[in-house]
Amino acid sequence: MDKLVIQGGSPLSGEVRVSGAKNAALPLMCASLLTGEPVRFSNLPRLKDVTTMLGLLARMGVQVSLDDRLGVELRAERVTEPLAPYDLVKTMRASILVLGPLLARCGEARVSLPGGCAIGLRPVDQHVKGLQQMGAEIRVDQGYIAARAGRLRGARIVADIVTVTGTENLMMAATLAHGTTVLENAAREPEVADLANCLNAMGARIRGAGTDVITIEGVDHLHGTAHAIMPDRIETGTFLAAAAATGGTIRLHGTDGKILDAVLDKLREAGAEVQVEPGVVSLAMRRRPKSVSLRTAPYPAFPTDMQAQFMALDAIAEGTGVITETIFENRFMHALELQRLGADIEISGNTAIVRGAPRLQGATVMATDLRASASLVIAGLVAEGETTVERIYHLDRGYESIEEKLSQLGARIRRVH
């Protein structure tokens, strides 16, 4: 099993390019199920989750053509098996995103209940409830969601909670439904808007994506298109947090600072100088960071996917930061590993009190989920001595060649097989 070995103490410095967003790429690839014509995506991140999704789509009969320029062409001319089996779904919760497109295009779907990270309960009941309101018959049978429908019907759907994948699933299903669907309390994430832009380019009629009310007028069929996947805002934020923690100066290319306002505000509060230009975000940290307090919430508030990285930043900052996690109930497991490096963190329910230490000490730590992995890498970059991060298969699910990119920025980091 691979691990990362990090020699801490080197400020990050230089320039690197941000990859396409995993959380945009996965629903976009599922959208290819809605048409028999080819759909081409550029800026595709090379990640384990992306490979898993491509394997799942290929198993359903989708023709997959990869090129060496970060592109893929998907053609679902015939969906031969509308099934997402447990052996593929268990490693990636986003597999649930095939449910809406399969039901809309094929009239049936059998999708395993998802697995994925152990960061807490992420129920799919909002997906099921919405599809049932659109006329689908759904039951849970031996760990699978079994769904059938004639042509789906437009409906007014009010989500009990804000769910990104739920919004995306229902929005995709509604594109081929008869009539108009209105999604209220919809997720506002940029990845939802990116998906809507692609669907509209395929012939869908979607208004309001990026707000909490999305209106979809169903059409009879969709056609192929070409779409560039948006930049990964969480990768952007992770590299910026790493540069801030190490006292570095970096420029990130191929990204968009406008979709990261809450994170950039907190970095400035920590003492970083942040500049945003078209396609570029730059950061310089010329002092020891100041502690920041934050509360995670749905977009446009501070993202839960950046909470762990800021806990690592607070661990070596000046002062005390209070971090409140409101999205996932189990998302402080990285705190125990950060403590192994000398971090002073006290957990009380969904709140972490982080008292900044003047220095951390290298040690062997274990990643528990995707973003926890990133926090341990950041801590290892600032710790004295050698840090080994084990179980980095989590990291490979969401960060493309992270050790290579950090090496470009001057980090002393290597992968050990």
Image (cartoon, grey):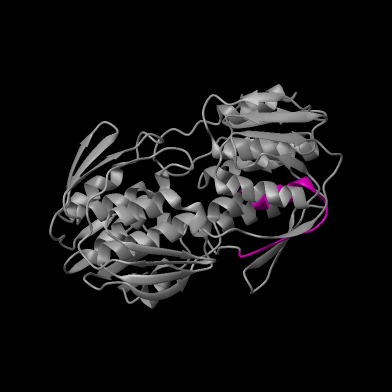
Query: Is residue 38 rendered magenta in the image?
Result: yes
Quarter of the image for the N terminus: give it.
Answer: bottom left
Nearer-the-camera pick, 332 or 225 = 225
Residue drawn at x 45%, y 73% as measured from the top left: 16
- Residue 139 relative to residue 13: left or right: right
Nearer-the-camera pick, 356 or 34 = 356
Magenta stretch in the rendered image:
27-43
The location of residue 317, given as percent across then percent down, is 20, 55
Residue drawn at x 14%, y 61% as measured from the top left: 359
* Residue 335 seen from this side: yes
The location of residue 54, given as percent across then percent down, is 64, 56
Q: In this view, does 283 lie above or below 169?
A: below
Nearer-the-camera pick, 371 or 116 = 371
Query: Is residue 29 rendered magenta in the image?
Result: yes
The location of residue 340, given as percent across then percent down, is 18, 53
Quarter of the rendering containing residue 62: bottom right
Quarter of the rendering containing residue 219: top right
Nearer-the-camera pick, 415 or 162 = 162
* Residue 1 seen from this side: no
Q: Is residue 91 above or below residue 274?
A: above
Quarter of the image for the C terminus: give it.
Answer: bottom left
